[in-house]
Image (spheres, rainbow, N blue to C red):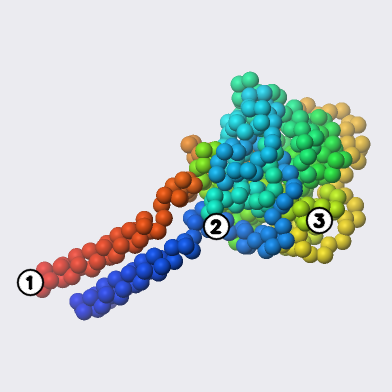
Amino acid sequence: MILAPGPRPSIRPVRRAARVAAAGILALAAALTAATPAQADPVREREYWLADYGIEQAWLTTRGEGVKVAVIDTGVDASVADLRGAVVGGTDVSGVGSADGSKPVGASNEHGTKVASLLAGRGTGTGSGVIGVAPAASVLSVSVALGGPTPGARDEDAQIADAVRWAVDNGASVINMSLTRNSLDWPESWDRAFLYAYQHDVVVVAAAGNRGSGTTEVGAPATIPGVLAVAGVDRAGAASFDASSQGITIAVAAPSEQLVGVEPGGRYVQWSGTSGAAPLVSGVVALVRAAHPELKADDVVERVLATARQKGQPEIYGRGLVDASAAVTDGVAPASGKPLGDLEEWVRLYRRAPAATPDPAASATPEAAPAVPADAPTADPAADALPTAGELRQVGIPALVLSVFAALAAAMAVVAWRHFRRLLRKG
């Protein structure tokens, strides 16, 4: 809005404004200094989904204790402060990673650590760092080399099948897959692996993919019957265009924009994509499994679906926006069947036909964020890197107070310059 020019203010109102501004800034500085213990952490305060999606309320019941979640991704750096103690095991199925799955591999090798931090991050202290949806859950890191050619890596489809089986055999009751094959179909080896997971009562959660990175329609594994496919929404709860996709297999939606995460080495970033929405839902599944250990996988999924906040347009939102508190605490009837479809029946009906020629362009790739900058493959280009945990410990209230007084000095300088110019005009 452009304002029409009005009468020139006198020196007195300017002085009054200066006094008011100075008093306001000094009052702010005093308030900030007095409130040192309650200073908001610049990373934690960005996790808007903790309050908006009932996660903090669900923590009054459980934080995911006793649940193992496998993160099938590019490896999880367990040494970062936010994940210390969270990763309890792992393996590599790529052929180029470390035996425990902690070495980041593939073209987007920071991806897995960010995903794990949103799922089961433990923060760096009270109210600081990235805390996941299920901060007391345990993580199994299964490293796969995805996102482009990786010298020495095994076939990508074989990696995924082996990763799912390993996760099941090593005690995971939830599997997170923030990746997409960018095709509706999948290899037969996946039939057997995903059936194995279902038969062993494991909930598999997968990202729907992003239009911004070329996934206009949901691709496998999010198209596989029995898989909980997650779409993305913006901060207001509206469907994200770039950081989501659409399809009839979408089950629920969760935030996929303005997310935060920690990368290998402890660098915090803001990022977008259903790669981040999926672990938020995996965390909710972990909370339900911890609160209701007697439930079978279908009944756990039914709780997540039945308590979602309806939005309409199921091909975009599925059953609606995930609600952690309701999923954990509401009374929900047991599932009457298989709420996400029957993979065994699908195989019986459709694998009889001759196999289609594989799409050479279809390969499993980490579901990346839209408009990615070259130096940070899944960082939000609109946001700079956030401070590391170490930097947050070093930069406290003294720096904040200094910045406040710097603002005061700048404001006073502007007022003085305006006053000086008016005196020159009078002279």
Q: Classify residue 62 by image quadrant.
A: bottom right
The amino acid marked with disc number 2 is Gly
Mark-to-mark CA distance, 3 and 2? 27 Å
**What x and y, as percent, mark residue 384?**
45, 47
Badge 2: residue crowd in 10 Å (few <14, some 14–19, many ≥20): some
Whether residues under marks 1 and 3 lie with C-beta atoms below 8 angstroms apart, the answer is: no
The amino acid marked with disc number 1 is Gly
Label 2 SS: loop
Which is more N-terminal, label 2 or label 3? 2
Which is more N-terminal, label 1 or label 2? 2
Residue tagged 3: 292
Residue at 47% from the left image edge and 62% from the top image edge: 37
Q: Which of the two marks, 1 or 3, is nearer to us in this view?
A: 3
**What x and y, as percent, mark residue 126?**
55, 56
The amino acid marked with disc number 3 is His
Q: Which of the two marks, 2 or 1, is nearer to us in this view?
A: 2
Q: Which mark is residue 427?
A: 1
Q: Nearer the viewer, residue 335 or 68?
A: 68
